[in-house]
Amino acid sequence: MTTTTRPNPTDVASSGQNTSLLTRIGRYERMPSVVAAEVGGIAGLAATAYIHLTELSGKFAEVPYLGVGYALLSAACVASIVLIVARYKAGWYLGGATAAATFLGFVLTRTVGLPGSTDDIGNWSETIGIQALVAEGVVVLATALMIIFCFRKGRTAPR
């Protein structure tokens, strides 16, 4: 009886064969020091998605393109969570970029406003907005820590 073995993704990548983007970006090891960042990142992403989903119907009614943005933001948060749980570095990159962009969006809506959405200019003390900023800040911080202390060392998960 012969058994068929699947090629090692590292061997496939070095041989020039097509590999997925996730394989090329790589995975990381789950060490005790990484678990705290994962918990923080996942909690922050979940909170960000939840906050924006609760505001979704109102945004579609007020400014439809912001409603679409909220829906895409929530989907990106969920995708990031799934990738982080699977230990793909791409989850951190997607989650960190999503949280940073959302943070920037909040600042823009409170300073210069967005097209068709100037009602929140100067409204810095809105409770749900502050909660979202905290959640996004946690994700950005956790992402930065993962990149600095885990990914830069070139550690990848064993295949």
Image (cartoon, helix red, strand yellow):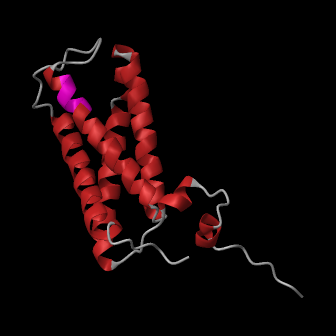
Q: Is residue 18 left or right of residue 74?
A: right
Q: Quadrant of residue 66?
A: top left
Task: Write the residue at 40% across / 19% down.
Answer: 65
Q: Residue at x 29, y 36 (%)?
A: 102
Q: Is 134 drawn above or below residue 148 in the view shown? A: above
Tell which residue pokes out farthest to the top in this image: 116
Verify whether residue 141 appears in magenta: no
Q: Is residue 110 visible?
A: yes
Furthest-bottom residue in view?
A: 1
* Magenta range: 105-109
Q: As drawn, which residue projects farthest toward the right?
A: 1
Of residues 6 and 129, the one nearer the viewer is 6
Q: Position of residue 7 (x, y in %)?
A: 69, 73
- The x, y position of residue 157, in whole percent, is 47, 74
Expressed as whole percent of the image width and height from the top left, the position of residue 61 reads: 38, 16
* Quadrant of residue 112 within the rendered picture: top left
- Residue name at image x 47 percent, y 66 percent: 27
Residue at 36% x, 42% y: name it.
Answer: 49
> What is the number of callouts on the image?
0
Quadrant that contains the N terminus: bottom right
From the viewer's perspective, is residue 43 above or below residue 56?
Answer: below
Query: If the image is split into quadrants, where does the C terminus sit?
Result: bottom right
What kind of secondary structure does the magenta stretch mostly adopt?
helix
